[in-house]
Amino acid sequence: MLDDMGNWRKTHYTKDVTSDLEGQEVILGGWIRNYRDLGGLKFIILQDKYGERQITIKKGVVSDQLFENVKMGYQYCIMIKGKVKIFKKAPGGVEIIPDKIKTLNVTPNKLPIDMTGETISELDLRLNNRALDLRSLRNQAIFRIRGELLKAIREFLHEHDFTEITTPKIIGSATEGGTELFPIMYFDREAFLTQSAQLYKEQLSGVYERVYEISHCYRAEKSHTKRHLCEIYVLDVEMAFADMHDVLKLLENLVYHAIKRIRENQFEALKFLKMENVTVLPEVPFPRYTYEEILDIIEKKLDIKIEFGEDIPTEAYRKLDQILPGYYYITHWPMSLKPFYIQPSKDSKYSESFDLQKGWLELTSGGTRVHNKEQLINALKEKGLNPESFDPHTRVFDFGMPPHAGFGLGIARWLTILCGLDDIREAVMYPRTPERLIP
Ligand code: ATP
Ligand code: MN
């Protein structure tokens, strides 16, 4: 028999129930992470969005009726009314002695995944049961860090005069070239899901000077790696009256600020993930290597030969991680590897571009952009793109486009690093991969 919530409302979250409340009556609500029945003594570990507290149900202490009626299962949704008692060994240094417990909803005898925290179920199984899985303490820690990360990014950028923008995700033509797009039906026409905010953020840097956006982009690539998703959440930044070197400084300070905030405000979550000695404040400025210097290191130290103009293969990055485990920049990529909007260097074999790496993983690509219209149109032609189809974008460059530079950073990639995860799918609430479209 299920109980009605009736007029019960939570008086506190678990985190607020501390020894200061000794003797006071509280109403808590949440889910049962653990339940033990030791005969004359029953324990419930109740979790809510902030943590957990122990409910102690002892024969003779609580009413006989309450004691007999308590028959619980993992992840039952309950509310309890009871008194706070100091008990050093329990979570938060308190236990709650219940007067009444309401069972609001129940679960099957056997849950599809382990929710006690004793083992970690296989990732695909967890993803199939994601809403349940997300309640786990591990996931609570990961997504609390994500929340802090997003907050810190916004805080930092607002302090540096950035305006938050929102640009369309449905686009009329395959804009940038390069990446594969997802076609969709837009009434009776074909349209696409955007691969990046690139062109729009550039346009808006000519309005608000410093802009950023955190939103979804779509990559229709059938990648099966631990770092690729089809739906990605990206921080896009663009600043006017600036070049790549200004962006390098801004980005390393942003990284520093975000880690600082995570350590200040989510240290417990870091500790839960055993990352408190790994996700530490990085030294700023980050080391800067040119693409050619990196090729040199890879050849001399790792014995892998990469020709100028080739992308750096994953295998080389993985090994490079041993030599360069921290945050570092790779600058001046060959122009042949870069999109049309990137500014070539004085020697046009190179480009004013960079990646931010953390060990083996690319977090960011960015660079100085072309802001001269004629040059932009020539760059389109050189990349085999049709300037006419880019007219809605290039015409903006007729109206006093300022010099500008920026970057795009994958949020899930950064979270993978910050939390020490093995697979990027763990860093997203509902990941989209070539095989996974549900839940
Ligand atoms: P990669 O070479 O690793 O596939 P990319 O160079 O194609 O990435 P960009 O176009 O530079 O990616 O996108 C900017 C940032 O967005 C990347 O640095 C990365 O952090 C993130 N990102 C790009 N593609 C993906 C993806 N498929 N899944 C997750 N994150 C991605
Ligand atoms: Mn890139």
Image (cartoon, rainbow, N blue to C red):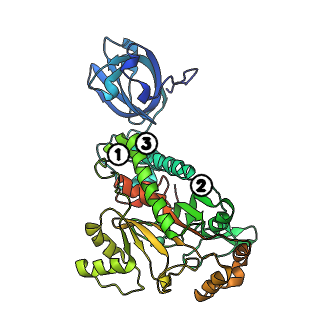
Closer to the camera in the image, 103 or 178? 178
Looking at the image, tell me whether mark 2 or mark 3 is earlier in sequence order.
3
Q: Is residue 154 visible?
A: yes
Q: Amino acid at mark 1?
A: Leu
Indicate the secondary structure of the residue bearing disc 1.
helix
How far apart marks 1 and 2 lie (CA) works out to 29 Å
256 shown above or below 69: below
Looking at the image, tell me whether mark 1 or mark 3 is earlier in sequence order.
3
Numbered tag placed on residue 270 in the rendering: 1
Please state the total of marks drawn on the protein image: 3
Indicate the secondary structure of the residue bearing disc 3.
loop
Q: Dot 2 corresponds to which residue?
A: 162
Question: Is the residue indicated by label 3 positioned so its CB lies within 8 Å of ligand 1?
Answer: no
The residue carrying pointer 2 sits among few (fewer than 14), some (14 to 19) or many (20 or more) residues within 10 Å by Cα, namely: many
> As drawn, is 34 to the left or to the right of 158?
left
Closer to the camera in the image, 311 or 181? 311
Q: Is residue 366 visible?
A: no
The residue carrying pointer 1 sits among few (fewer than 14), some (14 to 19) or many (20 or more) residues within 10 Å by Cα, namely: many
Image depth: mark 2 or mark 3 in front: 2
Q: Dot 3 corresponds to which residue?
A: 135
Image location of residue 357, percent across then percent down: 39, 66
Indicate the secondary structure of the residue bearing disc 2.
loop
